[in-house]
Image (spheres, rainbow, N blue to C red):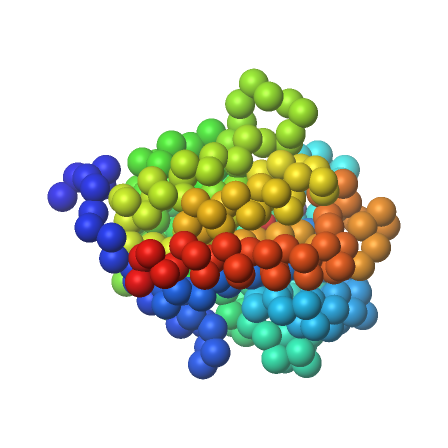
Amino acid sequence: MDIMTKKIYKQNIIKINDKISFGKGDLIVIGGPCSIESKSHILTVSKELKKVGVNIIRGGSYKLRTSPDSFQGYGKEAIRWLVDAGKEVDLPVVTEIVDVRQVDDFEDVDIIQIGARNMQNFYLLREVGKLQKPVILKRGFASTYKELLYASEYIRKEGNEKIILCERGIRTFENYTRNTLDIAAVPALHELSEYPVIIDASHGTGRESLVEPVSLAGVAAGADGLLIEVHNEPNQALSDGVQAISTQKMKSIVEKSKKIRDIIINERY
Ligand code: PEP
Ligand code: MN
């Protein structure tokens, strides 16, 4: 069947652990810093996020930065700090793989992220497809839905169907925002695939003030989850501080988005 043929609405269930699954109707909120800055930093943020109802902790370990002079992440060491923090607060964790040679470093990570810049790194997609771990696949910032769906096929064809699609904004002529978050991607990808769809309003807007309204709009459009950058001290962040929200604001987003989800979900399930 053509990849762009409308499918009858049906969603894969992706179990992350005994308490958290995508595809069962729950809104899954993923939060954490752009970069994992130290062992104590990720633990502090994780503890705060647990208190406000976040379901999964994120944090960048290997970073893909536009400038080689920007902070590149603490790599393997940061993954260890993240995994330990996740265990301590009893929440699953997600971090981004950027190269096929890093696969072994991700053994204890619950979900692997493929970032926008690697959406068409087909050899990396195939390697991740062999792992049987859930994958968050982000849309490239100049990619169509069709290209995103073909990218997901590289993972699926290796036998891994635990794929979560993420709309994180695309490049347009607008430059007030860092990217233009394409809300229509949420219902469109639901029509075209069986995968849960989440949105990332942090990279999608690049502005702290816009993260909450755009996240809520994504949930109203049917998003199954949110991915949001949160920092305990946003103005001290080593990367993406201008789009990082406080844990207090995250609390408000979690509460409001779950209410909106309840309205949406009653119509679908
Ligand atoms: C990220 O989530 O840390 C990230 C780098 O996002 P993106 O690939 O969407 O730019
Ligand atoms: Mn970031």
Locate residue 180, reporting x and y percent: 55, 31
Q: Nearer the viewer, residue 169 or 215?
A: 215
Residue lying at 31% horizontally and 42% vertically, measured from the top left: 150
Query: Residue most toward the top?
Result: 173
Q: Is residue 234 visible?
A: yes
Q: Is residue 161 visible?
A: no
Residue lying at 45% horizontally and 81% vertically, measured from the top left: 18
Q: Nearer the viewer, residue 65 or 260?
A: 260
Locate residue 114, reporting x and y percent: 49, 51
Image quadrant where residue 249 sits: bottom right
User: Vertically, is 242 above or below 25?
Assistant: above
Task: Name the quadrant of the C terminus.
Answer: bottom left
Locate residue 236, reporting x and y percent: 86, 50
Residue lying at 72% horizontally and 42% vertically, measured from the top left: 208
Image quadrant where residue 224 sits: bottom left
Image quadrant where residue 49 sits: bottom right
Residue lying at 45% horizontally and 61% vertically, measured from the top left: 262
User: Vertically, is 38 above or below 173?
Assistant: below
